[in-house]
Amino acid sequence: MKLINLCNSLEKFAPLFLQEDYDNSGLLIGNKNKIISKAIICLDVTEEVLKEAISEKADVIIAHHPLIFKPLKKITASNTIERIVEKAIKHDIAIYAIHTNLDNVFEGVNNALAKQLDLKNIRILQAKPSTLKKLMVYVPSSHADNLRNALFAIGAGNIGNYDSCSFQIEGEGSFRALEGSNPFVGNKNELHFEGETKIEIVFPAYLKAKIIQTLHKNHPYEEPAYDIFALENEWNITGAGMVGFLEKPMSEINFLKQLKRQTGTGCIRYSPLTGGYVQKIALCGGSGSFLIGAAKAAKADIFITADIKYHEFFEAENQMIIADIGHYESEQFTKQLLVDYLNKKFPNFAVRISEPNTKVVNYL
């Protein structure tokens, strides 16, 4: 298949619109029209991973962390990133990054960690703002079903665990077709009244261009009347972190021991124990200190993440435990998540996890 088909599938799963402003997710190296047959999955693109891709004749490396994060002003093989870029281009190996956009989708990085910890009733910890819009469109009643169904088909009308959500009301619209027009109903230069249906439907902001395209394709008027505006509502299936529950409460120290086994981390750095039990768990794969307040507000018993600084542990304020399990350790299950997704979408496409261990932090 073509590389663009792989990119489109990954971006349907984790839309680039959902990446943070500082991020650089997406296709970093490669021609989208290139024919590909094998991919290697990793957290980080290292020289060892690239060497493996060359040896295995892989066409693309899919990494969680972007290889190119800061602008490259030159490529002179003077550092690791420049050498990887140069060598990947020479060997025609594409590199794709799926980073904070995968952090921010429900079935992404945090879900993989939550499943590893056997959490139940999971939900997003902090919903991503400004991700929803609403379409209001007026359409002849005879064409309302067709337009509505076309919008549903591309992803509009999803609210929580419900799809095909919309509101409609019947009314009467008026217009006068002027010279140069080609009216679907009515006559030129005559005021016309038409029975119309007003449809209201919510959609994720990244679908805006597709919504407008679908509207024009399925609306009979040459000049459809519609409005699109931003919503302040939270989209509770996108955002940072996750909250879930253990099936039964555990003592704090026993849970920490279990957490160490489940993640295989060499060390857990944690704030003082509160003397209570653990059942409600908040977590964030990768650097999650920005969610400490959200975890406390959710009344979590413990917040599991990585890259916590010394003074940030004080923010637990004896209301919960903050546990730092390591950056790699909190995101390692993302690799299998991507393999499972791509195997399901492309059964005949070879995908496997990279063998070199890219964990850069070790414990003595």
Image: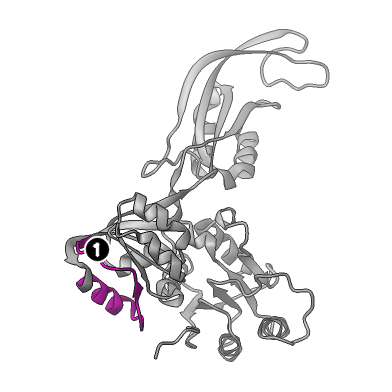
- Residue located 47% across and 38% down the image: 233
Rendered view: 307 above or below 85: above
Instruction: Give amino acid for label 1.
Output: Thr
Q: Residues within 10 Å of mark 1 (few under 14, many from 20)?
A: some
Q: How many numbered markers are drawn?
A: 1
Whether residue 333 appears in this view of the structure is no
Residue at image x 62%, y 69%?
Answer: 3
> Is residue 169 something that shows in the picture?
yes
Horizontally, is 158 left or right of 185 in the view?
Answer: left
Nearer the observer, 80 or 142:
80
Q: Quadrant of residue 118?
A: bottom left
Q: Quadrant where the N terminus lies?
A: bottom right
* On screen, residue 165 above or below 141: below
Q: Position of residue 160 (x, y in %)?
A: 39, 43
Q: Secondary structure at mark 1?
A: loop
Question: Would you identify the image quadrant in which residue 209 lies?
Answer: top right
Is 298 magenta? The answer is no
Front residue of this view, candidates 296 and 229? 296
Picture coordinates of residue 49 (x, y %)? 56, 86
The residue that label 1 is drawn on is: 274
Residue 203 x/y as whole percent: 52, 40
Q: Residue furthest top?
A: 190
Whether residue 259 is in magenta: the answer is yes
Q: What range is drawn magenta here?
A: 254-278
Q: Residue at x 31, y 70 (%)?
A: 116
